[in-house]
Amino acid sequence: MRVALFVTCVNDAVYPSTGIAVVKLLERLGVEVDFPPGQTCCGQPQFNTGYRRETEPLVRRMGRVFEGYDHVVTPSGSCAAMVRDNYPRIARKGSDPQLQRVSDALVPRMYELTEFLVDVLGVTDVGAYFPHTVTYHPSCHGLRMLGLGERPRKLLEAVKGLELRELPGSEECCGFGGTFAMKNSDVSVAMGEDKVRNAASTGAEVLCGADNSCLMHLGGLLHRQEAPQRALHLAEILASTEKEPLG
């Protein structure tokens, strides 16, 4: 089984520890992971801002970079959803037949991390150890577009030492929404403040999510409020072990 890591722009530039955690986790489970160095952006910022034609070269590049792999795994629901939901739309509207070939080839092989663990590897207990209280925020893309459902929660519930606490209003958007946070900053901040207030009410030490774009927004709010709670990607919790606790 040939597996490639699509680390995404946010993780590559801001949260490399998440990408490292994914590799550590998958290798612990017996998966050999490749990291194609030619990978760049999937095109989500451009497409969501209305620049479909400018997204097309990035679609073609993604097709070339990840050609030949059985599975492409990413620790980002929003980027996985970009490929699976929007690449077919881009292909239908584009004039280049190569776009359709890329979409047809890549979409079935693109997996968000928790999907890959539960659906492909068939595991929920990944041998993790994380002795902390945690509350989980499901991102909009993972919740609504990918339909991740209970997969992240099942993985967290199987972590040794972890106490999972329910997040009030968990299905509400955190307010990030990519360029929405820049174009509508006041609304974005207000939504984020609601989310971190709910997270604080749980008393959990860690606010966990499966998408670092959301966690960047929420983590920034927590930092500015000097809150004791910290934001942490699910992959870093799952990669933590009793021998090498990341907590």
Image (spheres, rainbow, N blue to C red):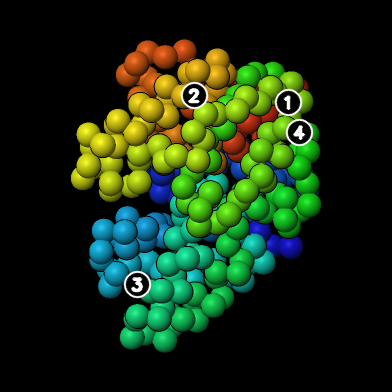
Q: Is residue 188 above or below residue 161?
A: below
Q: Between tags 2 and 3, which lies in front?
A: 2
Q: What secondary structure is found at the residue carrying circle 4?
A: loop
Q: CA distance from mark 2 to mark 3?
A: 39 Å
Q: Between tags 3 and 4, which lies in front?
A: 4
* Image disc number at residue 158: 4
Count neighbours of disc 3 (C-alpha within 10 A) and say few if under 14, some if 14 to 19, many if 20 or more: many
Q: What secondary structure is found at the residue carrying circle 3?
A: helix
Mark 2–mark 3 CB contact (< 8 Å):
no
Q: Give the percent coordinates (x, y) of residue 23.
A: 63, 44
Q: CA distance from mark 3 to mark 4?
A: 41 Å
Q: Give the percent coordinates (x, y) of residue 84.
A: 51, 65
Name the residue carrying label 2. 199
Residue 4 lies left or right of residue 190; in this view the side is right
Q: Amino acid at mark 3?
A: Glu
Identify the residue at horizontal 49%, vertical 33% (top origin): 169
Q: CA distance from mark 3 to mark 1?
A: 42 Å
Q: CA distance from mark 1 to mark 2?
A: 22 Å
Identify the residue at horizontal 59%, vertical 36% (top origin): 234
Q: Nearer the viewer, residue 70 or 186?
A: 186
Label located before the other in sequence (1 or 4)? 1
Report the quarter where the C terminus lies. top right
Name the residue carrying label 1. 129
Q: Amino acid at mark 4?
A: Ala
Q: Amino acid at mark 1?
A: Tyr
Q: Is residue 202 above or below residue 68?
A: above
Q: Give the percent coordinates (x, y) of residue 187.
A: 26, 37
Label located before the other in sequence (2 or 3)? 3
Residue 162 lies left or right of residue 72; in this view the side is right
Name the residue carrying label 3. 56
